[in-house]
Amino acid sequence: MVAAFDGGRLTSDGGVLLLAAAERQLGICDRLAALISDPRDPSRVVHSPADILRARILAIAGGYEDAGDLDHLRRDPGFKLTCGRLPDPGRDLCSQPTMSRWENAPSLREVIRLMRAMVDLYCASYPRPPAAVTLDIDDTVDVVHGRQQLSLFNAHYDERCFLPSTSTTPRPPAR
Protein backbone atom coordinates (compact mmCIF):
# COMPACT_ATOMS: atom_id res chain seq x y z
CA MET A 1 0.00 0.00 0.00
CA VAL A 2 1.27 3.45 -0.89
CA ALA A 3 -0.17 6.63 0.62
CA ALA A 4 0.47 9.97 -1.00
CA PHE A 5 -0.60 13.33 0.36
CA ASP A 6 0.08 15.38 -2.72
CA GLY A 7 -3.41 15.15 -4.17
CA GLY A 8 -3.90 18.86 -4.58
CA ARG A 9 -5.92 21.15 -2.39
CA LEU A 10 -7.49 19.24 0.49
CA THR A 11 -9.48 20.23 3.54
CA SER A 12 -9.28 18.92 7.09
CA ASP A 13 -12.72 20.35 7.87
CA GLY A 14 -15.06 17.82 6.24
CA GLY A 15 -17.43 17.98 9.21
CA VAL A 16 -18.63 21.42 8.16
CA LEU A 17 -20.29 19.79 5.15
CA LEU A 18 -22.72 18.02 7.52
CA LEU A 19 -23.36 21.24 9.42
CA ALA A 20 -23.97 23.08 6.14
CA ALA A 21 -26.50 20.47 5.06
CA ALA A 22 -28.38 20.90 8.35
CA GLU A 23 -28.21 24.69 8.07
CA ARG A 24 -29.59 24.64 4.53
CA GLN A 25 -32.40 22.25 5.50
CA LEU A 26 -33.44 24.58 8.33
CA GLY A 27 -32.83 27.72 6.25
CA ILE A 28 -31.13 29.48 9.15
CA CYS A 29 -28.81 31.81 7.23
CA ASP A 30 -31.40 32.78 4.62
CA ARG A 31 -33.91 33.54 7.37
CA LEU A 32 -31.45 35.60 9.42
CA ALA A 33 -30.03 37.46 6.40
CA ALA A 34 -33.55 38.59 5.46
CA LEU A 35 -33.74 40.46 8.80
CA ILE A 36 -30.65 42.61 8.17
CA SER A 37 -30.78 45.58 5.82
CA ASP A 38 -28.13 45.60 3.12
CA PRO A 39 -27.16 49.17 2.22
CA ARG A 40 -24.59 48.06 -0.38
CA ASP A 41 -24.92 48.97 -4.04
CA PRO A 42 -26.56 45.85 -5.59
CA SER A 43 -24.49 46.19 -8.77
CA ARG A 44 -21.29 45.80 -6.74
CA VAL A 45 -22.34 43.00 -4.36
CA VAL A 46 -20.20 39.87 -4.73
CA HIS A 47 -21.24 38.00 -1.58
CA SER A 48 -24.88 37.82 -0.52
CA PRO A 49 -25.73 38.48 3.15
CA ALA A 50 -26.77 34.83 3.51
CA ASP A 51 -23.42 33.64 2.11
CA ILE A 52 -21.52 35.94 4.46
CA LEU A 53 -23.52 34.71 7.46
CA ARG A 54 -23.13 31.10 6.36
CA ALA A 55 -19.35 31.44 6.05
CA ARG A 56 -19.08 33.06 9.49
CA ILE A 57 -21.42 30.66 11.28
CA LEU A 58 -19.77 27.58 9.79
CA ALA A 59 -16.29 28.94 10.49
CA ILE A 60 -17.20 29.44 14.15
CA ALA A 61 -18.76 25.95 14.30
CA GLY A 62 -15.53 24.59 12.79
CA GLY A 63 -13.47 26.17 15.57
CA TYR A 64 -12.39 29.29 13.67
CA GLU A 65 -13.80 31.98 15.93
CA ASP A 66 -11.62 34.83 14.65
CA ALA A 67 -12.89 36.63 11.53
CA GLY A 68 -9.26 36.79 10.38
CA ASP A 69 -9.41 33.03 9.77
CA LEU A 70 -11.67 33.75 6.79
CA ASP A 71 -8.68 34.97 4.80
CA HIS A 72 -7.37 31.38 4.84
CA LEU A 73 -10.75 29.60 4.79
CA ARG A 74 -12.05 31.60 1.82
CA ARG A 75 -10.04 29.31 -0.49
CA ASP A 76 -10.56 26.08 1.49
CA PRO A 77 -12.35 23.54 -0.74
CA GLY A 78 -14.52 22.20 2.10
CA PHE A 79 -15.68 25.61 3.22
CA LYS A 80 -16.32 26.68 -0.36
CA LEU A 81 -18.57 23.63 -0.83
CA THR A 82 -20.48 24.49 2.36
CA CYS A 83 -21.36 27.86 0.84
CA GLY A 84 -22.45 26.42 -2.49
CA ARG A 85 -19.25 27.19 -4.36
CA LEU A 86 -17.18 24.78 -6.42
CA PRO A 87 -13.78 24.09 -4.83
CA ASP A 88 -11.94 24.70 -8.12
CA PRO A 89 -12.30 27.14 -9.85
CA GLY A 90 -15.29 28.45 -7.89
CA ARG A 91 -15.32 32.02 -6.63
CA ASP A 92 -13.65 32.41 -3.20
CA LEU A 93 -15.66 33.15 -0.06
CA CYS A 94 -15.65 36.60 1.52
CA SER A 95 -12.49 38.03 3.04
CA GLN A 96 -11.83 39.15 6.61
CA PRO A 97 -12.48 42.86 5.87
CA THR A 98 -15.86 42.02 4.32
CA MET A 99 -16.68 39.82 7.32
CA SER A 100 -15.65 42.51 9.82
CA ARG A 101 -17.78 45.16 8.07
CA TRP A 102 -20.75 42.80 8.01
CA GLU A 103 -20.40 41.79 11.68
CA ASN A 104 -20.69 45.43 12.70
CA ALA A 105 -23.49 46.32 10.28
CA PRO A 106 -26.73 45.27 12.07
CA SER A 107 -28.53 47.93 14.09
CA LEU A 108 -29.81 47.25 17.60
CA ARG A 109 -33.33 46.68 16.23
CA GLU A 110 -31.95 44.16 13.73
CA VAL A 111 -30.02 42.35 16.46
CA ILE A 112 -33.26 42.08 18.47
CA ARG A 113 -35.06 40.68 15.39
CA LEU A 114 -32.21 38.19 14.90
CA MET A 115 -32.53 37.07 18.52
CA ARG A 116 -36.28 36.59 18.14
CA ALA A 117 -35.76 34.57 14.96
CA MET A 118 -33.27 32.31 16.74
CA VAL A 119 -35.75 31.75 19.59
CA ASP A 120 -38.46 30.95 17.02
CA LEU A 121 -36.15 28.46 15.28
CA TYR A 122 -35.36 26.82 18.62
CA CYS A 123 -39.03 26.57 19.61
CA ALA A 124 -39.94 25.23 16.15
CA SER A 125 -37.54 22.32 16.72
CA TYR A 126 -40.03 20.91 19.26
CA PRO A 127 -43.50 19.51 18.52
CA ARG A 128 -44.70 21.84 21.29
CA PRO A 129 -42.58 24.75 22.55
CA PRO A 130 -41.05 23.94 25.96
CA ALA A 131 -42.66 25.46 29.05
CA ALA A 132 -39.25 26.53 30.38
CA VAL A 133 -35.68 26.69 29.15
CA THR A 134 -32.63 26.53 31.40
CA LEU A 135 -29.55 28.30 30.13
CA ASP A 136 -26.37 26.88 31.67
CA ILE A 137 -23.78 29.47 30.72
CA ASP A 138 -20.18 28.88 31.67
CA ASP A 139 -18.14 32.05 31.46
CA THR A 140 -14.45 32.18 30.87
CA VAL A 141 -12.50 34.06 33.50
CA ASP A 142 -10.53 37.05 32.18
CA VAL A 143 -7.89 37.72 34.84
CA VAL A 144 -6.60 41.28 35.18
CA HIS A 145 -3.35 42.50 36.65
CA GLY A 146 -3.60 45.28 39.19
CA ARG A 147 -6.84 47.11 39.87
CA GLN A 148 -8.05 47.82 36.36
CA GLN A 149 -11.25 49.77 35.94
CA LEU A 150 -14.40 47.58 36.08
CA SER A 151 -12.50 44.54 37.38
CA LEU A 152 -13.87 42.83 40.46
CA PHE A 153 -12.65 40.13 42.82
CA ASN A 154 -14.17 36.74 42.04
CA ALA A 155 -14.06 34.42 45.06
CA HIS A 156 -14.51 31.27 42.98
CA TYR A 157 -11.35 31.96 40.97
CA ASP A 158 -9.58 33.79 43.83
CA GLU A 159 -8.59 36.46 41.28
CA ARG A 160 -9.46 39.98 40.17
CA CYS A 161 -11.08 39.69 36.77
CA PHE A 162 -13.76 41.01 34.42
CA LEU A 163 -16.04 38.09 35.23
CA PRO A 164 -19.00 39.08 37.44
CA SER A 165 -18.13 38.69 41.07
CA THR A 166 -19.50 35.89 43.22
CA SER A 167 -18.53 37.93 46.25
CA THR A 168 -19.27 41.62 46.67
CA THR A 169 -16.68 41.97 49.41
CA PRO A 170 -13.38 43.15 47.96
CA ARG A 171 -10.40 41.26 49.22
CA PRO A 172 -7.27 43.08 50.35
CA PRO A 173 -4.24 42.53 48.12
CA ALA A 174 -1.98 39.64 49.09
CA ARG A 175 1.25 40.59 50.90
Image (cartoon, rainbow, N blue to C red):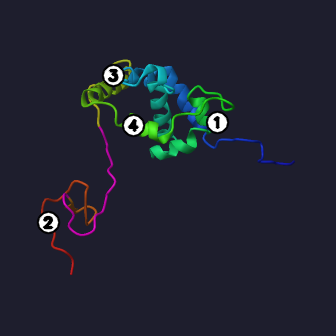
Q: Is residue 125 visible?
A: no
* As drawn, 63 above or below 114: below
Q: Give the mark nearer the N terminus: 4 vs 2.
A: 4
Q: Nearer the viewer, mark 3 or mark 4?
A: 4
Q: Is residue 72 left or right of residue 29?
A: right
Q: Determine which of the numbered discs, if any, sits on residue 120 in the image.
A: 3
* Residue at numbered disc 1: 77
First in sequence: mark 1 or mark 3?
A: 1
SS at mark 3 in the image: helix
Q: Nearer the viewer, mark 4 or mark 1?
A: 4
Q: Nearer the viewer, mark 1 or mark 2?
A: 1
Residue type of the residue flagged with mark 1: Pro
Corner quadrant of residue 72: top right
Does 136 lie within the magenta span? yes
Distance from disc 4 to disc 1, alpha carbons, whole Å, reads 24 Å
- The residue carrying mark 2 is 170
Q: Nearer the viewer, residue 164 or 56?
A: 56
Q: Amino acid at mark 2?
A: Pro
